[in-house]
């Protein structure tokens, strides 16, 4: 990266006084509250990094007011260039995302809708009566309409999204379908801890986070985000989480590089957006979309690959792209149910329910807010390997977590039997399924803590 022109720019850190940014959340009438996004966290960039080439005595300074721009320049300055994933979603990006959901190759939305329609009563029962529903990253709210209609006496619905245009459409659609439901749309970055501030009270809060959006975060960030949702939900709160499950690489690559080329347009729109909104001069035809599956990290990555050697200007800086060099724009982590149970437990959520489509491509998982005393231990490495059981804080190895997850799946299918050699009755209880999973793991020699004296596994 090189500063462009004589005046180099110092990117002001985006921490603005929050009180000044927080608009008044609007009454239950449903007008749109826009909370100005601050620079995304987790991407700290030092001033030196941003003003490479400046001198201490004469730092030519120009302030770039837009926090997104500071983050963009910082991200493009990294050895592996990247861009903030949330910027994929502007008006055009949101429309393109909805078209992706309709493609043959993108199984994610179809699988999730299948679960929602098949298990709707059970899901609504789990959510309980009198809930205030918060949906981070609501998009057009298409999946939520069904859920809201099935809930018993929902108090209000607060869709949160970074893109005001999609939030507007969401509000209109819900208003038409459920004219009596109070709406509190909030335009904000859901990674910011203050984005839930000021939402109305309800008997209990339900966080609905479908679409596998949680997969867009590194496991450690996902845990932090779910911890924030736990704070927003409060005591007795519930979470219904959409989780895309691990599957073969070819299916995943097709889903993120569909034959109709819609995902490619979605990804490339990010560069067009930077040209439009931040005066960048990306030649969008000189980049191509790429979907790569990283087996070790269990994630599919979207990149934009430079077709030739080129320079691009943005934010007063010039960035060099070698031919073949890529910008990483999105990751979608894929989980096993047991891995997500562990990750959510570390964020203060106790797993209660698991719903899957018949082909087991996708899971909706139901969680209840754990009592406050739960430790909030960060999941550090692979989300399966770092399992730490919330009750009792005991560590299981990877093999044990897998066996427990398998027992849970068999319980769900109704094929898990109790008794010696599986000759007993069908197991319905979650605790019993975990105990069976653990004793199977012990038999296989997996790392499992010894049984407590006088009692079975919990
Ligand atoms: C994968 S789409 C899911 C949309 C919808 N929930 C669904 O299940 O189809 C992600 C949504 O989250 C929104 N989004 C992404 N990052 C966000 C952020 N940091 N804060 C708020 N909304 C965000 C996008 O605008 C988009 O509507």
Image (cartoon, rainbow, N blue to C red):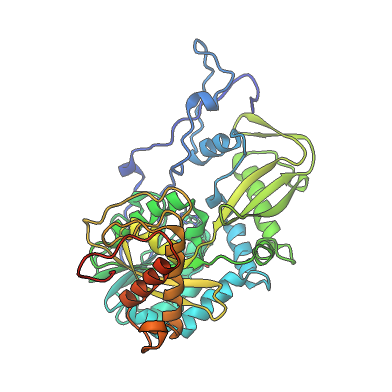
Q: Is residue 425 visible?
A: yes
Which residue does the image show at 61% across and 58% down from the upper left?
A: 93
Which corner quadrant holds the N terminus? top right
Decide if residue 306 is on the left or right side of residue 33: right
**Which residue is at a point 41% across and 71% down the rendered structure image?**
440
Q: Is residue 357 left or right of residue 328?
A: left
The residue most toward the right is 308
Instruction: Kindly indicate the quadrant of the structure image that contains residue 250.
Output: bottom right
Coordinates of residue 62 in the picture (x, y in percent)? 52, 25
Whether residue 105 is situated above or below residue 178 in the rendered picture: above
What residue is rendered at 42% in x and 57% in y? Answer: 397
Q: Position of residue 119 (x, y in %)?
A: 44, 83
Location of residue 235 in the rendering, given as x and y in whole percent from the top left corner: 23, 64
Task: Please state which of residues 278 and 205 is positioned toward the viewer in this rendering.
Answer: 205
Q: Is residue 150 visible?
A: no
24 on left or right of 304: left
Q: Position of residue 433 (x, y in %)?
A: 36, 76
Residue 158 occupies quadrant: bottom left
Q: 132 or 233, which lies in front?
A: 233
User: What residue do we see at 29% from left, 69% from top?
Assistant: 457
Badge count: 0
Of the 4 image quadrants, the one containing the C terminus is: bottom left
Where is 19 relative to 150, above or below? above
């Amino acid at each position: 990266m090189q500063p462009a022109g004589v005046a180099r720019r110092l990117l002001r850190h985006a921490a603005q006084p929050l009180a000044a940014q927080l608009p008044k959340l609007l009454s239950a009438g449903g007008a749109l509250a826009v909370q100005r996004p601050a620079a995304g966290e987790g991407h700290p960039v030092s001033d030196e990094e941003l003003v490479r080439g400046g001198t201490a005595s004469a730092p030519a300074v120009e302030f770039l007011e837009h926090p997104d721009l500071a983050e963009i320049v910082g991200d493009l300055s990294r050895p592996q260039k990247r861009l903030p994933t949330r910027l994929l979603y502007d008006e055009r990006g949101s429309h393109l995302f909805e078209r992706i959901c309709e493609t043959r190759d993108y199984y994610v939305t179809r699988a999730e809708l299948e679960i929602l329609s098949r298990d709707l009563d059970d899901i609504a029962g789990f959510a309980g009566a009198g809930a205030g529903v918060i949906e981070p990253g609501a998009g057009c709210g298409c999946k939520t309409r069904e859920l809201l209609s099935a809930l018993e006496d929902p108090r209000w619905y607060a869709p949160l999204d970074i893109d005001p245009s999609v939030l507007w459409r969401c509000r209109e659609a819900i208003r038409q379908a459920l004219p009596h439901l109070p709406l509190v749309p909030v335009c904000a970055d859901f990674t910011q801890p203050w984005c839930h501030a000021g939402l109305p009270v309800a008997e209990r809060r339900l966080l609905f986070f479908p679409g596998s959006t949680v997969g867009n975060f590194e496991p450690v960030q996902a845990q932090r985000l779910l911890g924030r949702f736990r704070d927003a939900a409060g005591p007795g709160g519930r979470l219904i989480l959409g989780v895309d499950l691990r599957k073969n690489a070819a299916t995943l690559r097709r889903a993120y590089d569909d034959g109709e080329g819609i995902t490619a347009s979605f990804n490339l729109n990010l560069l067009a957006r930077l040209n439009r909104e931040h005066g960048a001069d990306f030649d969008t035809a000189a980049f191509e979309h790429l979907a790569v599956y990283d087996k070790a990290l269990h994630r599919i990555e979207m990149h934009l690959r430079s077709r030739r050697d080129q320079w691009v200007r943005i934010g007063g800086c010039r960035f060099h792209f070698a031919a073949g060099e890529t910008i990483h724009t999105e990751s979608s982590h894929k989980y096993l149910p047991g891995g997500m149970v562990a990750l959510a437990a570390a964020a203060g959520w106790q797993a209660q329910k698991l719903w899957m489509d018949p082909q087991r491509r996708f899971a909706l998982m139901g969680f209840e807010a754990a009592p406050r005393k739960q430790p909030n231990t960060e999941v550090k490495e692979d989300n399966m390997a770092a399992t730490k059981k919330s009750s009792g804080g005991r560590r299981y190895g990877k093999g044990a977590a897998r066996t427990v997850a398998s027992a849970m799946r068999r319980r769900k299918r109704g094929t898990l039997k109790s008794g010696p050699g599986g000759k007993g009755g069908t197991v319905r209880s979650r605790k019993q399924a975990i105990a069976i999973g653990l004793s199977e793991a012990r038999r296989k020699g997996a790392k499992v803590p010894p049984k407590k004296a006088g009692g079975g596994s919990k």
